[in-house]
Image (cartoon, rainbow, N blue to C red):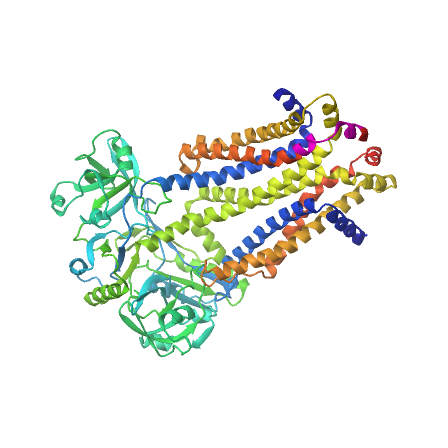
């Protein structure tokens, strides 16, 4: 039965190449945009190199302090000291890392200037995040406490800094802002869209200019807490909140008198959203409004277009419908036939879209638009796309099918 | 004639609902797109207000070094000014032109208030960025001894705070301080060409304060990274704990441009495809529905209607449909200028509405012309025979 429906759909497609083109163009365009979009969201929020454990990690990025009248509010990352005091002693997590957000800097080689981002990290950073070491190894607790001036660099930076890319960079010196560091490892870089792990050069936090000695609570450091298992996340959040709650308030930090402290440990997505939506509920509503409007237009417009084309072509198939009805086919059967036909066509469009998205994603990855971009069509992206295909096919098929199945037998046979 | 067309459409309103919705949705998409484009183009047409070629920003950070920061800063400034390659140097707050950071504050004069962008800069700022003044002069170190700290404002801040008054010598209040206006510059688009001019206040920098340690330098054309390396090396040997990061304003301008243009480009590409999609669909629908009205066409032809009157009839029907959709769209789009959504100029929305209306009619006409021509060639005898 199903096979028959699909055969009929195929014949209908072949009958009018122009209309087939319109239909497939609309479907594949919409699905391509959606697939590239999902792939990009997956790139932003999924667990990918080097943050492969993102699904069982909590991110501690922002401390919000306000005074008693709530007139003045300070939002900033924290100092190394503060995080060491309050994140290190947590008992539930497997491990935790403290590191600075990347900072722009420059290095000079001969007449060339190399722009680079630097980050100061602890030794756990290399265990929480799974970097691929092409050469050498990361620094460990011992290297850090001995105060050695070492650095882990990315492959890209190595190629820019050292003229001979064939030779190993390990053991060589780099000069950043007038300080010499010995390279002990070369890693594959992390894309700039992963703000926590992106950098070109990583230093131990004891390196000069890292400000890890800073006494006040605010600073430039973040933390990632890795749970043993995903289900431990709520317990870790509770334990951390308990510690934050016990902080003495009101207090004085530098020249800021605070009455409230709020530090959250959130999953990556929630952390990202809470920072974006910091503007309050009004902004949230506006953002959701704009996104749903765009999505509605993106799916809705081609769907309406398809419905219109389908409806206006009903009469082409009037005689077929008339005969089937005359022989006693119930409305439901006809309805399903047209929906299945539509879904079949949508899947052809989906296949085209898959090829197109693959091409576009390759283009984005290779264009250098985002350095180290690694957009992929993985299983989850693919499944979401299939789901969207189904929904789209159903949406654009139901209304025309209803119209068709309601045709009067006599009229249908006459047309 | 037009009433007749409306009647025809109205009689088949149920069949046409979806078509109207489709045109309506395309109108809204177009409206969004053209608002964005009109906004960026009108921003681009305003003068930038300064020059950025050969200007570098040096961002200095004292890190954990808190000893004699002011004195070190002053030595560094002297050293920078002494290089032959440096034409002019100015110390300012960290929100240098095209940078990501901003400072703003409410400024008031009499009862007028303006949310103004604030830049703290020393007396060489205008010289370094080659900013022309339209009235008054830039403040000098000698001005700092007066009762009020000197400021320079841009034309927009002048308009909002003073209206038609002459601002020179007047006092404005911002935050805790009071400031005396020394001069007026025309525009200052600190976030690049694609951002509109904002009310701006330049406040004199206090050279004895330890903050505001960004230095803008204008170098001689052709100065390269060799000098830059030397500069950074000299600064960091004067203050070993400090960090010094050099950024070319041309680079940060590029960043700001990307920030403005990448979303517009993506939006443009997607909307372009959506509209092509809609146009193809419309074309297909019209083709089918006009072909189905052969009988009607044959009858009219037999009664003496000319070819052109037939094709104009179908194009006219589509215009009526489009008018329904556009009126519905206007009700929604009209809210944007009325309610001042996103704080854009009313003119931007009006222009955008005008552009979208024109484009919608153009698309509809384009899609209707070929099928109506086809319809017009119908031979009355053949068409009537089919019936």
Residue A389 sits inside the magenta stretch: no
- Place of residue A12 in the rendered image (x, y in percent of width and height, measured from the top left): 75, 47
Q: Is residue A300 visible?
A: no
Dividing the image into 4 quarters, which one contains the C terminus of chain A?
A: top right
Q: Residue furthest right?
A: A327
Indicate the quadrant where residue B203 lies.
Answer: top left
- Place of residue A318 in the rendered image (x, y in percent of width and height, measured from the top left): 79, 38
Give the total of numbered labels: 0
Residue at x 55%, y 62% (from the top left corner) = A231
* Left or right: B164 as drawn, with respect to A261: left
Work out whether A375 lies above or below A132: above
Q: Main secondary structure of the magenta part?
A: helix
Indicate the quadrant where residue B217 lies.
Answer: bottom left
- Place of residue A67 in the rendered image (x, y in percent of width and height, measured from the top left): 32, 48
Work out whether A82 lies above or below B321: below
- Place of residue A131 in the rendered image (x, y in percent of width and height, measured from the top left): 46, 70
Indicate the quadrant where residue B374 lies.
Answer: top right
* Left or right: A153 as drawn, with respect to B292: left
Q: Is residue B302 visible?
A: yes
Work out whether B300 lies above or below A52: above
Residue B376 sits inside the magenta stretch: yes
Q: Nearer the viewer, residue A145 or A301?
A: A301
Q: Which residues are magenta?
A: B372-384
Q: Nearer the viewer, residue A214 or B10?
A: B10
Residue at x 79%, y 43% (from the top left corner) = A334
């Amino acid at each position: 039965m199903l096979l028959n429906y699909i055969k009929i759909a195929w014949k209908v497609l072949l009958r009018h190449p122009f209309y087939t083109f319109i239909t497939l163009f609309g479907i594949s365009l919409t699905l391509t945009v959606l697939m590239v979009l999902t792939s990009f969201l997956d790139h932003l929020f999924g667990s990918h190199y080097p943050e492969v454990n993102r699904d069982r990690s909590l991110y501690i990025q922002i401390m919000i302090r306000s005074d008693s009248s709530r007139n003045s509010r300070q939002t900033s990352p924290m100092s190394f000291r503060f995080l060491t005091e309050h994140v290190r002693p947590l008992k539930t997590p497997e491990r935790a890392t403290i590191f600075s957000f990347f900072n722009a800097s420059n290095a000079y080689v001969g007449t060339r200037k190399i722009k680079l981002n630097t980050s100061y990290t602890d030794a756990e950073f290399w265990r929480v995040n799974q970097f691929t070491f092409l050469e050498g190894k990361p620094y460990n607790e011992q290297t850090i406490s001995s105060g050695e001036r070492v650095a882990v660099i990315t492959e890209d930076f190595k190629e820019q800094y050292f003229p001979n890319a064939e030779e190993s960079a390990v053991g060589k010196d780099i000069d950043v802002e007038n300080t010499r560091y010995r390279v002990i490892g070369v890693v594959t870089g992390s894309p700039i869209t992963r703000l926590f792990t992106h950098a070109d050069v990583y230093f131990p936090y004891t390196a000069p200019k890292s400000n890890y000695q800073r006494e006040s609570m605010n600073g430039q450091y973040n933390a990632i807490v890795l749970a043993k298992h995903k289900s431990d996340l709520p317990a870790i959040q509770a334990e951390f909140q308990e510690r934050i709650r016990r902080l003495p308030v009101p207090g004085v930090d530098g020249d800021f008198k605070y009455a409230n402290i709020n530090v959250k440990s959130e999953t990556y997505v929630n952390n990202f959203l809470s920072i974006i939506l910091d503007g309050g509920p009004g902004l949230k509503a506006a953002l959701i409004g704009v996104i749903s409007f765009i999505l509605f237009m993106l799916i809705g417009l081609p769907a309406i277009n398809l419905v219109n084309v389908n409806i206006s072509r009903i009469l082409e198939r009037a005689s077929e419908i008339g005969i089937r009805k005359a022989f006693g086919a119930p409305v439901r059967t006809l309805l399903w036939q047209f929906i299945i036909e539509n879904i079949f066509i949508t899947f052809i469009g989906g296949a085209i879209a898959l090829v197109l998205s693959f091409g576009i994603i390759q283009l984005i990855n290779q264009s250098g638009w985002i350095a180290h971009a690694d957009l992929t069509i993985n299983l989850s992206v693919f499944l979401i796309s299939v789901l969207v295909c189904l929904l789209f096919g159903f949406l654009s098929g139901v209304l025309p099918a209803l119209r068709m199945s309601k045709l009067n037998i006599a009229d249908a046979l006459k047309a | 004639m037009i009433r007749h067309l409306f009647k025809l459409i109205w009689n088949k309103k149920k069949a046409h609902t979806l078509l109207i919705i489709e045109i309506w949705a395309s109108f809204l998409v177009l409206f969004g797109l053209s608002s964005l484009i009109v906004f960026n183009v009108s921003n681009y047409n305003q003068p930038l207000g300064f020059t950025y070629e050969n200007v570098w920003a040096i961002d200095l950070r004292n890190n954990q070094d808190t000893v004699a920061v002011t004195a070190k800063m002053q030595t560094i400034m002297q050293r920078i000014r002494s290089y032959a390659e440096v034409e002019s140097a100015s110390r300012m707050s960290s929100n240098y032109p095209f940078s990501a950071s901003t400072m703003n504050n409410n400024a008031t004069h009499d009862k007028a208030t303006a949310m103004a962008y604030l830049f703290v800069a020393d007396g060489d700022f205008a010289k370094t960025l080659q900013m022309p003044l339209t009235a008054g002069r830039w403040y000098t170190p000698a001005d700092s001894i007066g009762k009020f700290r000197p400021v320079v404002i841009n034309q927009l801040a002048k308009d909002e705070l003073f209206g038609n008054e002459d601002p020179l010598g007047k006092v404005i209040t911002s935050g805790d301080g009071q400031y005396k206006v020394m001069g007026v510059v025309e525009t200052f688009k600190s976030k690049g060409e694609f951002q509109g001019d904002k009310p701006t206040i330049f406040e004199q920098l206090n050279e004895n304060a330890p903050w505001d340690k960004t230095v803008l330098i204008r170098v001689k054309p052709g100065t390269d990274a060799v000098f830059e390396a030397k500069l950074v090396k000299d600064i960091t040997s004067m203050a070993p704990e400090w960090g010094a990061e050099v950024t070319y304003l041309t680079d940060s301008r590029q960043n700001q441009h990307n920030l403005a243009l990448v979303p517009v480009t993506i939006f443009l590409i997607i909307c372009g495809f959506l509209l092509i999609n809609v146009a193809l669909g419309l074309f297909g629908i019209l083709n089918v529905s006009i072909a189905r009205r052969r009988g009607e066409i044959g009858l009219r032809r037999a009664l003496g209607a000319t070819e052109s009157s037939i094709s104009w009839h179908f194009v006219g029907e589509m215009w009526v449909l489009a008018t329904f959709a556009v009126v519905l769209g206007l009700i929604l789009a009209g809210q944007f200028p009325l309610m001042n959504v996103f704080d854009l100029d009313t003119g931007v929305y009006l222009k955008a509405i005008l552009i979208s209306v024109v484009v919608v009619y153009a698309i509809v006409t384009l899609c209707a012309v070929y099928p109506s021509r086809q319809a017009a060639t119908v031979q009355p005898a053949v068409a009537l025979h089919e019936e």
